[in-house]
Amino acid sequence: MIREDWLQKSGFSASPKTLAEYVTLFNAIHAGDYNGDGKTDSWGITSEKDLRDLDGFMNPAFGIHATWLKDDQGKLINAQISPQERSKLEFYHSLYQKGLLSSQYITTNWELKEDEFYTGKVGVVSVSSPGNVGVYQEKMRQIHPDATLTLLDPPEGPAGKGLAATDVSMETRGFAMSSLSKHKKEVMILLDFLASPEGQMMEQMGFENTHYVRQGDTISVTPKINAWYPRFIQAANWKPPVEWRTPAMLRYIDNSQRYFRADNAFIFPASFAAAIDSTSSIYNQWAYQFVSGKASFDKWDQYVSAWKAAGGNAMTEYAEEKLK
């Protein structure tokens, strides 16, 4: 997502289409002093603590279309240690070197990411739902009343374009209720209500007379609707009684459906918990070192060996059986 006026100042009338055009956009933001502080210190893009904000729309450009890929011999290989991953991290490193990717992304939380976006310290940020798009727009207008946000499309790369594959093996951010809860009945009543037409109206559009008003058979939204977002589920197939969502929000929904691809990830047995944690930790450590330049890509094989020794070999063997 980017401010529309910044996109136009960068020489684009629409979303950049390729990785090269994205680099051009990031360069223009970095050098353009669009925030007017007299310095060329704005980053093109940032991420939140790791690289998933970038991976979400860049993975397919490098051929990372699933958790488990096939190598040149047709054998399974985890994407984290694949040649495609190395190419992607080399690209990220080039952005980091040029000051186009925030040098502080590793310590950036969501509050700092938002603040840097609203204050013009960074030009492009990733959003995780159409509701977030609306919230970002509302917060941006509180600081820059005339600013309009627009959604960017994923770039075309050597191996295609799209969004990162979606894990369908489980709901990774679902909801759980404690077995010790004294309010199980009330929770189920709430969930049943949210599944009803009336509940979905509240979930998607907020509270009557606060976020929207009824006048007979007509519904109109209030300015506060822009600060509302669903607390439980963003239902892409829900049709609002009045269309209030911005073009950027609708484009987010359209892109999510257009570029959807189911991942081949699966649920490992509990005995693999330590291996999963160890390999993930090793990946995150080395990924930051490669991107920041603290480690040369000459050490790629060292990283791969560490990943395999931390439980990666056992995970791969299990995946070969699971994904036959």
Image: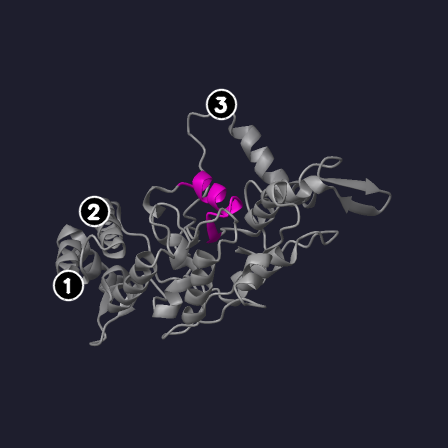
Count residues near mark 1 (Cα–Cα under 10 Å), then give few for <14, some for 14-19, many for 20+.
Answer: few
Front in this rendered view, residue 32 or 167: 32
Count residues near mark 2 (Cα–Cα under 10 Å), then give few for <14, some for 14-19, many for 20+.
Answer: some
Q: Residue furthest right?
A: 216
Tag 1 secondary structure: helix
Q: Which residue is mark 1?
A: 298
Q: Which residue is mark 3?
A: 182
Instruction: Name the N-terminal-most of marks 2 and 3.
Output: 3
Which mark is drawn over residue 4? none
Circle nearer the viewer, 1 or 2: 1
Q: Is residue 194 left or right of residue 125?
A: right
Identity of the residue drawn at 35% across and 62% down: 264
Amino acid tagged 2: Ser
Identity of the residue drawn at 55% across and 35% down: 188
Q: Magenta includes 122?
A: yes
Mark 3 to mark 1: distance in Å? 57 Å
